[in-house]
Amino acid sequence: MQAVAAWLDKWFGFYSRGSSIKKEVIGGATTFLTMAYIIFVNPSILSEAGMDYGAVFVATCLAAAIGCFIMGFWANYPVALAPGMGLNAFFTYSVVGGMGYDWQTALGAVFFSGITFFLLSVFRVREWIIQSIPMTLRRAIAAGIGAFLALIGLKNANIVVANDATIVTLGHLGDPSVILAAFGFFTIIGLAARGVQGAALMSILAITLIAWVLGYVDYTGIASMPPSLAPTFMQMNIEAAFDLGMLSVIFAFLFVDLFDTSGTLLAVAQKAGLAKKDGSLPRLERALMADSTATVAGSMMGTSTTTSYVESAAGVASGGKTGLAAVVVGLLFLLAMFFSPLAGMIPPYATAGAIIYVAVLMLFTLQDVDWNDITEAAPVMVVLLMTPLTFSIADGIALGFISYVVIKLLAGKSKELTFSVILLALLFVSKFIWLG
């Protein structure tokens, strides 16, 4: 046992960071509990795009495990990965549902975004891109995705329904799905406020149990061998993803993942004490490559973009400070594959509360916006409103960049604009003019 501990310490160096195997395992388990809701939410969302639920369930677990193993063994960061919230909604409701592409083509776009992200990481272009984008637009994009997720969660819960006269309206509050979804959301908030780890997962399982007791769902079992991956494995349509109309889709997948991953790595690494005195992060390129490699692998198996999870900070707070914690998370995702019958029982309204909860977390970025500067506040409003109202993250981002440049120019603040922001705004204008 001591020999194994010595080998693990030689690889991960947890003793030098004031940690231990026990702390790393506890940290990894804590991180898994806080993000395990994605095992149920991701198949629920992607199956609405016509994908096989069981295959997506397995793909979700495998993509997460691959990302965690690369992040843990190679980059040695206590950061867990899984298919990202927001991007899976963009995949289903915008690319497939709104733009009319099939899910195979959407997977092709995810594949290319992963390849592009990998190349940007290798050639260190990522730093230039991120530093060139104003913080205002970065915060606006996160908040816009949060608003988009909130709308999807409310829709899945039947709290907000379609209406020909007013576009949307309040659903029937006496509907069992509405009551259970609302109870699930309030449960998550109550548990999270008390510092309970895994609040979202507990709520999903509790609502499913209540629904089963009331006869709203059928019992199909708890554990079994994993479903077949065949329905989604290597089904991405790479040729169709070359369509000009897919450029904005690929860009949206890439852009959101770029900032999401960078922000998460910075936050978690600082909490774990990995950042150097100058603020730089060791082995950053490896961590970014872990993210992009997992995205490529995930697209091959049948899931949307895989990204780093900020919930990893919970694991760090519980003692996990090295890549061993990420490896533990990966192992738990592999174990989760054997609980597909349980996943199949979970109704959409059981996961709606978790989706809305994630939306609340993403809207926190609005607190850092300079609301006293109208040239900063207005573009944020554009992204915040247009992302959910157009039901498209890509369009929300595009309109945000265009409005930011136009407003700064008209306000006489052209010096605050960078070349990359102006270039991206012009590309988005061209896209709307020629591609619709």
Image (spheres, grey):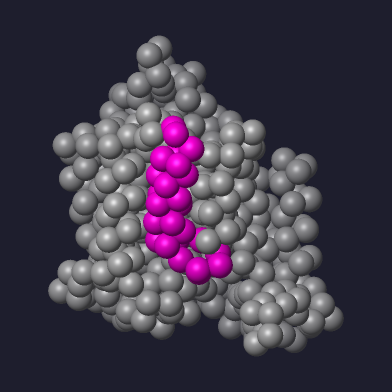
Quick check: 169 left or right of 274? Answer: right
Q: Overall secondary structure of the magenta stretch?
A: helix
Quarter-of-image position of residue 211? bottom right
Give the residue displayed 72% in from the left and 40% down from the top: 195
Q: Residue furthest top?
A: 277
Q: Nearer the viewer, residue 117 or 338?
A: 117
Q: Nearer the viewer, residue 90 or 316?
A: 90
The percent position of residue 298, horizontal first and vertical second, equals 31, 61
Give the residue displayed 72% in from the left and 74% down from the top: 159
Quarter-of-image position of residue 173? bottom right
Magenta-drawn stretch contains 399: yes
Give the residue displayed 68% in from the left and 63% down from the top: 353
Q: Nearer the viewer, residue 86 or 141?
A: 141
Give the residue displayed 73% in from the left and 64% down from the top: 184
Magenta-drawn stretch contains 48: no
The percent position of residue 118, horizontal first and vertical second, equals 22, 46
Residue 398 in view (yes/no): yes
Locate the N terminus and report the quarter of the image it occupies.
Answer: top left
- Magenta highlight range: 387-413
| Number of disc labels | 0
The percent position of residue 178, horizontal first and vertical second, equals 75, 75
Quick check: 43 left or right of 236? Answer: right
Q: Nearer the viewer, residue 113 or 316?
A: 113
Quick check: 116 left or right of 255? Answer: left
The percent position of residue 313, horizontal first and vertical second, equals 54, 36
Asked if 292 appears above or below 263 in the picture, the reply is below
Residue 222 in view (yes/no): no
Locate the C terminus and report the quarter of the image it occupies.
Answer: bottom left
